[in-house]
Amino acid sequence: MDGNEKALHNREAFQLERVILFTDAVFAIAITLLVIEIKVPELEHRSEDAALQGLAQQTAKFIGFFLSFFIIAVYWMAHHRIFRFVTHTTPKLLWLNMLFLLSIVLMPFTTAFQSEYAMLRLPWVLYSLNILFSGWMQHRLQAYLGSPAAAVVRPAEQQHPDLDPVRPLVSPLIFLLSIALAFVPGVHASMLRPLPMLLFPAFWLYQRRFRRLTREFQHTRVPAPTAVPSSPAETLPAPTPAP
């Protein structure tokens, strides 16, 4: 690597590092803002019963906090997992990443909205749409990273199972189901809250696909076996006919 190539490599590495650091900061701020909506209860009487009652009144906010904390954490780990393959940035990659972060910074608001009005349908639908947006942008990111035309990932790693564009669609499908059920007559808004528990069996089922992709990826990376002679005689040259 000559001086110009080394300078280009260092510049690309620096630009990629800036993107990752900025993304980490956005995730950290978003996940911290979740807890701001949980206020310390004001007690009319300083007693154990009053304190328990004050906490009980914020049950919906605690549930919303833990759910969104888990979702944001999963998206951060996914981002961390896929960006280790990136060799350099492109304008399209930057915009896809920014749109993905847009969905993340919206989550504290939609979480607070659906936690405050847990008995209403619209806040939950808006929250679910936020998750749909996040999952779709994560899907677009991974599809772009795995694209040979984008060339932001080494060809040998473009088919890595961690870049599977199907994986980010698992969560959106569950929340899409909750949106559909929200408009079914007789379905109360409170009935939709347990649906995210389906994420655990859904991801468990996805592991079958992930293991298959892993086997296929490892198979493509295994070098072809070198032919080994069965006996020392095979290594000797053919005898020359006598004159």
Image: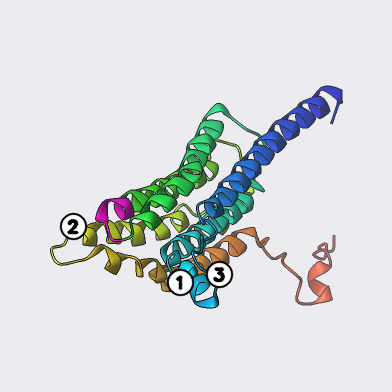
Label 3 or label 1, whichever lies nearer to me, is 3
Give coordinates of residue 43: x percent, y percent. Answer: 51, 64
Label 2 or label 3, whichever lies nearer to me, is 3
Between 133 and 61, the residue placed more toward the observer is 61
The residue that mark 1 highlights is 53
**Nearest to N terminus: mark 1 or mark 2:** 1
Badge 2 density bin: few <14, some 14–19, many ≥20, Cα 10 Å: few
Taking the view exactly as shown, the residue that stands out farthest to the front is 45
Q: In the rendered image, which quarter contains the N terminus?
A: top right
The tally of labels here is 3
Residue at point 65%, 44% (across, down): 24
Give coordinates of residue 176: x percent, y percent. Answer: 30, 56
Q: In which quarter of the image is residue 185?
A: bottom left
The residue that mark 3 highlights is 46
Between 225 and 71, the residue placed more toward the observer is 71
| Callout 3 touching callout 1 (CB < 8 Å) | no
**Nearest to N terminus: mark 2 or mark 3:** 3
Kind of residue indicated by mark 3: Arg
Badge 3 density bin: few <14, some 14–19, many ≥20, Cα 10 Å: few
Kind of residue indicated by mark 1: Gln
Q: In this view, does 8 lie above or below 232?
A: above
Between 43 and 113, the residue placed more toward the observer is 43
- SS at circle 2: loop
Instruction: State which region is magenta.
Output: 119-125
- SS at circle 1: helix
Between the C-alphas of marks 1 and 2, the distance is 33 Å
Give coordinates of residue 183: x percent, y percent. Answer: 18, 57
- Residue 123 in the magenta stretch? The answer is yes
